Every structure is written in C-alpha cells, then in structure tokens.
Image (cartoon, rainbow, N blue to C red):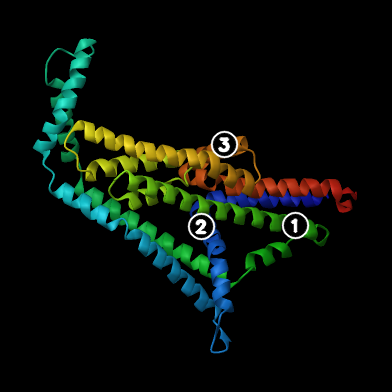
Amino acid sequence: MQRFLLYTILTIALFCLFGWYFSDITFFFVISLILSAILRPLTNQLNDFHLLGQHIPRWSAIVLSYMAILFVLGLLSLLFFPLINNQIMILSELDLDGMYEKIQTPISKVEVMLFKYELLENRPGMLFEEIKETLIAAISNINVGSFISGIIDTTTTLFIGLLAVAFITFFLLLENGFLRRNLLNLIPNPYFELSVATITKIEKLLSNYLTGLLLQVMAIFSIASLGLTIAGVDYALTIALFAAVANLIPYAGPLLGSAFGIIVGISTGDYESGSQLNYLIIKILAVFGVVQISDNIFLQPLIFSKSVKAHPLEIFVVIFAGAKLAGIVGMIFAIPVYTIIRVAIMEFYQGYKSYRIFKIK
C-alpha cells in the first residue's frame, strides 16, 4: 500500500513538473481534450451513419465534425464583420477638431469643479490643452512597423497553435478511448475497480460542467441580445455574442462584456446631446445588470454547484488561485482541474475506508 501511494505521488509530481516545463504543449493538449469531448458525440453519430450499406469511416466523420465547427464559427464571425467595417469607416472619417470641440464642454465643467476645490491652477483651458497634447503625443508615438510586426507574430503563433490543437484532437477522436485504455493499463489490478469508478465519475462531472457552460453561453446570449434589441442598441447580436463568450472568464468577463457594449454603443450610436448619450449608456448598463443578476442567481449556482458538486466558496477560492498561477487561462481552467483533483482524492479516500485491499499490510 505504501509503495502504491509513493508511486502515485511521484507520478503526479512528475506529471505536474512536465506540464509546467512544457506549458505550451500542455495547454494545446488540454484544449484538444476539451474539443475532443465536445466533438466525440457528433463524430460517433456520423461514424454510425450508413452510406450505401457501409459505415462512414471514422476519419471522414472527424473531418465532417471539423467542417461543422468551422461552419458555425464562420456564421458567428459574420456578426463581427459589419461592426469592424463600421469602425474602420469611423476611424477613416475621424474629425479630430470636431472631436475636440465635443469634449471641450464636459472637460471645462470638470475644470471649473477642480478650480472650486483648488485642485488645479487657476488657468482656464489648461486641462483641455494638456489632454489634447497627450492624445497627439500618444498617436504620434505609435510605431506602425512594430505594430504590424506584432500582428504578424501573433498570427503566426495562433496559426501554429491551431494546427497543433487540430492535429492532437484528430488523433484523440480517431483512437476513441485510447487515453483511457492506456491509463487504465498502468493501474495495478487490486486498484482497477476503484480507478475505473473514479475516472468514470470525473468524466461525468466534466461532461456536466461543459454542458452547463454551453447552456450558460446560450442563455446569456439570448438575454443580452433580446435586451439590447429592445433598448435599440446597434449591433445587439454582436455585443451579446462577445459578452456571452467573455463571461467564460470568471468575474472579469462580465466587466469586459459591459465595457465592449458601451464602447460599441457610443461609437455607433446616433445621438445629438449629452443626455441622449447618457441615456444610451444607462440602457446598456441596465441590460447587462439584468444579465448578471440572471447569471449570478440562476445560472452559476446551477452550473458550478450542481455540475461539479462544489460549494460556492470553494469555487471562489479555486478561481482566484488559478488566476494567481496562470492569469486568465488559469481562471478558465481552474474549476475543471479542481474537479479532477477533488474527485480523485474523495474517491480514493472512500476506497481507503471501504475496500479491504487498502487495509492489507
């Protein structure tokens, strides 16, 4: 028993060390595992489909699953093309002098308030001139060459990552159950039954969690798109889609979605006075307020507490621990990783109390 526990601890330690040292490969592999879990039901259905009395080859079913995903992503990207085109036109027709005139009045009001409390020197127009000079300096300091080089490097890295994920996912789907079988082959016979029960429970909880996340994204998209459409905000579907995807980032996601909605609403809205602008912002914030209330009261407790069977306080601590270790990526993957560790420990602890094999000296 002691030898088995020692081997288990050493194996986990080596696995964690490998994952940390080869973090890029580990990240690609985790993404591939998630994608394979999502695509496996569709792939299995296509593989079982008969064409001219024959099963569709599994590799063909995988390719068709990839094409389905690409088709859905293509449809979703169509929501962003009109917005991007609109922003490019706005930037190309940007009138800096007119923009300065629009912001001069509110800045003057702020300046008067600062004068009143003696927080600024009594020199009218100084605050506006400093802001204007700062904007001009920021625009003039932009290095176009470095910016383009950064875009090329990012695109190249993203392309390589997509190829790696597609390659790994393809073979995970092609060799259906390959990882599970090889993992179980490494387990000694006395602990085989307990290990199978543990892996099955982990797979079920993670499947419930992924299904819950999908339902959460769909619910947030539906509520936000309906609310923004009723509020008369342009590009309501685009804002709602961004907010639904950004919401996958715990705590920070809702703020990103709200900020994106306000920026798009301000840049594309048609308003003639400050009161109309304020009303537009209030409507957008009201919609996202309803979205967050619905998410926090109904969706998140259903997804986190029910699917992974963890207390909300546990989830809170785990998410911030993930943020400390790996930033945004850590926040996104904190709950699945915690679920695996938590279930494994609980199952083996129950096995230690219940199974005779653990009590043999």
For numbered disc 2, what is the local secondary structure? helix
**Residue under pointer 2:** 31
**Residue 197, numbered circle:** 1
Please tell me how crowded label 3 is: few (under 14), some (14-19), or many (20+) other residues with Cα within 10 Å.
few
Q: Residue furthest front?
A: 230
Q: Position of residue 213 (x, y in %)?
A: 53, 51
Q: Is residue 245 left or right of residue 195?
A: left
Q: Judge left or right: residue 226 versus residue 17.
A: left
Amino acid at circle 2: Ile
Eye-nearest disc, 1 or 2 = 1
At 29% from the left edge and 53% from the top edge, which residue is drawn? 151
Circle 3: element type: helix
Which is more toward the observer, 151 or 193? Answer: 193
**Residue 291 to residue 172: above or below:** above
Question: 146 or 93, which is in the foreground?
Answer: 93
User: Of the residues under marks 1 and 2, which one precedes in the sequence?
Assistant: 2
29 over 173 or under it: above or below? above
> Which amino acid type is shown beneath numbered disc 3?
Phe
Could you tell me how far apart the alpha carbons at marks 1 and 2 are, in whole angstroms? 24 Å
Residue corresponding to mark 3? 316
| Residue at the limit of the structure toward the left, as seen here | 97
Q: Nearer the viewer, residue 35 or 233?
A: 233
Can see residue 2? no
Above or below 60: residue 118? above
For label 1, the crowd category at 10 Å Cα-Cα, with few meaning under 14, some 14 to 19 and many 20 or more, is some
The location of residue 86, given as percent across then percent down, is: 21, 52
Place of residue 348 in the rendered image (x, y in percent of width and height, measured from the top left): 77, 49
Q: Amino acid at mark 1?
A: Ala
Is 287 on the left-hand or right-hand side of 111?
A: right
